[in-house]
Amino acid sequence: MHSKKIHSFLLAHKNGINYSKIDDRSGCSFKEALKELKSKKRRKTLHYSWYVFPQPYTSKGKSKTSNRFLLNDRETIEYLKNKTLKSHMFQTLKAIKFKNFKTKKEFIDYFGFVDYMKFLSFCHHFMKPKFKKYL
């Protein structure tokens, strides 16, 4: 049985999100996000960073959507123990690696500055020593 938080991530990965009544954005499914990451596009156009690059609670965002996908330490461990979410995380990182960004500027040009900052926060959070045994 999953916690409510992990269930939200799994639903977002499967179906995307539609919070148009809350925010003016909608997010795509993980499958669509991965397809975009693997494409030759020069710029990210879909919304998925909220649930593909989970943020620690210390990174409280400006939108209700971003705040919905914040993780505390216990939830981060649960996220990493979930086979689907962990697999998606590694597929995403692999796709980004194969984008072969040479500079920080190239990364920002593709993702935009806000999503670049989300990615850094995600990396710093998930690479904490207390989570390494779950990777």
Image (cartoon, helix red, strand yellow):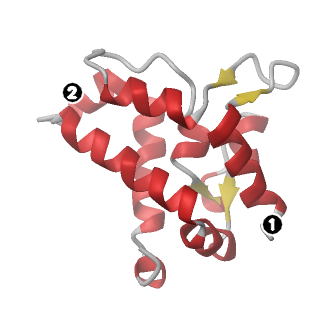
Label 1 neighbour load within 10 Å: few <14, some 14-19, many 20+: few
Q: What separation in Å lies between label 1 and label 2 (alpha carbons)?
A: 37 Å
Which residue corresponds to the image point at 68% horizontal and 76% vertical from the top-left? 74
Residue 52 rendering spot, x and y as whole percentages: 53, 44
> Horizontal placement of 9 versus 88: left or right?
right
Judge whether residue 32 can be spotted in this image.
Answer: yes
User: In the drawing, what numbered circle is on residue 3?
Assistant: 1
> Horizontal placement of 105 versus 131: left or right?
left
Q: Amino acid at mark 2?
A: Glu
Which residue corresponds to the image point at 60% horizontal and 67% vertical from the top-left? 82
Dot 2 lies on which element? helix
Q: Quadrant of the C terminus?
A: bottom left
Residue 132 rendering spot, x and y as whole percentages: 40, 79
Up the image or down, 58 lies above or below 75; here it is above
User: In the drawing, what numbered circle is on residue 106?
Assistant: 2
Q: Nearer the viewer, residue 41 or 15?
A: 15
Residue 15 rendering spot, x and y as whole percentages: 70, 33
- Image quadrant where residue 109 sits: top left
Q: Amino acid at mark 1?
A: Ser
Dot 1 lies on which element? loop
